Image: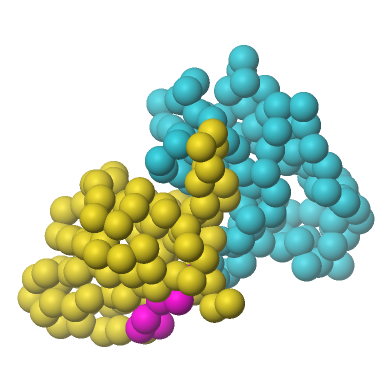
Chain colours: A yellow, B cyan
């Protein structure tokens, strides 16, 4: 099993460009998340999804969009990239049961620099 | 009050030392609690879940005090390989909230 796969691993964007960060999981987890981590800081939630067709905003959604058409895929779209979006982006999944949600499993991250 | 607060450190300890990390959380409705480890420029990985009764995994012991909204992690007999950032994580049913992490540096 690959687990959680993120592509690309690295990317340099120019201000105003757009891109999509891909996240795919083969763990059949319902919950998926996008976090960003700035240097020396904690992880901040951008968007999350509790299942196909359902998405919700996290703490820092401005400048981003997501979609969840399948259980496996949860792409993150950056429109009009800005230097403030320079960060490491992590995708994560989480299994759920009827009574609790378990621990999160992370992809290896995408390091994005906007210049 | 921040949702999940940790002392950022760094904690500098010699090999073989015992070190303790603390964490407080603000949402009394939180349901699940974890410690994650993050190595430099890597993704976070689960170290251990934290249960109300306390739990141990080898050299690592975690405690949860729901009344005080306080979580702890104790590492005994520190190894060089324990050098990392330790993230306190608190979960509701839908989301997980991460502390900023406590950096541990173990020296020979």
Tell me: A62 left or right of B24. Answer: left
Name the residue at the top extreme. B67
Magenta stretch secondary structure, dominant: strand
Question: Is residue A53 rendered to the left or right of residue A31?
Answer: left
User: Residue at 25% of width from left, 51% of height from top?
Assistant: A55
Q: Is residue A39 above or below residue A26?
A: above
Q: Which residues are magenta?
A: A4-9
Q: Is residue A7 magenta?
A: yes
The structure residue drawn at horizontal position 78% and vertical position 67%, both measured from the top left corner, is B81
In this rendered view, identify the residue nearer to me: B103 or B47. B47
Q: How far across and down, in percent of the image, does residue B15 sit? A: 87, 60
Residue A43 position, x and y percent, is: 42, 53
Which residue lies at the image location 61% right of the left edge and 61% below the top edge? B45
Depth check: give the residue in front, A38 or A34. A34
Q: Can the viewer see residue A63?
A: yes
Which of A103 and A9 lies nearest the eye of the viewer?
A: A103
Q: Is residue B19 left or right of residue B41?
A: right
Tell me the quadrant of the picture where the C terminus of chain B can be found.
Answer: bottom right
Q: Is residue A63 magenta?
A: no
């Amino acid at each position: 099993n690959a687990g959680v796969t993120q592509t690309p691993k690295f990317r340099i964007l120019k201000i105003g460009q757009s891109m999509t960060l891909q996240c795919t999981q083969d763990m059949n987890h319902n919950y998926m998340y996008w976090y960003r981590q700035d240097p020396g800081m904690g992880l901040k939630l951008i968007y999350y999804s509790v299942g196909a067709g359902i998405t919700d905003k996290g703490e820092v959604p401005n400048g981003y969009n997501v979609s969840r058409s399948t259980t496996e895929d949860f792409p993150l779209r950056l429109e009009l990239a800005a230097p403030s979006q320079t960060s490491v982006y992590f995708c994560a999944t989480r299994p759920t049961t009827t009574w609790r949600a378990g621990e999160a499993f992370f992809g290896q991250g995408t390091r994005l620099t906007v210049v | 009050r921040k949702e999940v607060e940790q002392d950022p450190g760094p904690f500098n300890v010699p090999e073989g030392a015992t070190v303790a990390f603390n964490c407080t959380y603000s949402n009394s409705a939180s349901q699940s609690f974890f410690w994650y480890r993050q190595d430099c420029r890597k993704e976070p990985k689960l170290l251990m879940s934290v249960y109300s009764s306390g739990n141990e995994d080898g050299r690592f012991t975690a405690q949860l005090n729901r009344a005080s909204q306080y979580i702890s992690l104790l590492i005994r007999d520190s190894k060089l390989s324990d050098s990392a950032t330790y993230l306190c994580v608190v979960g509701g049913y839908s989301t997980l909230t991460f502390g900023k992490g406590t950096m541990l540096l173990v020296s020979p």
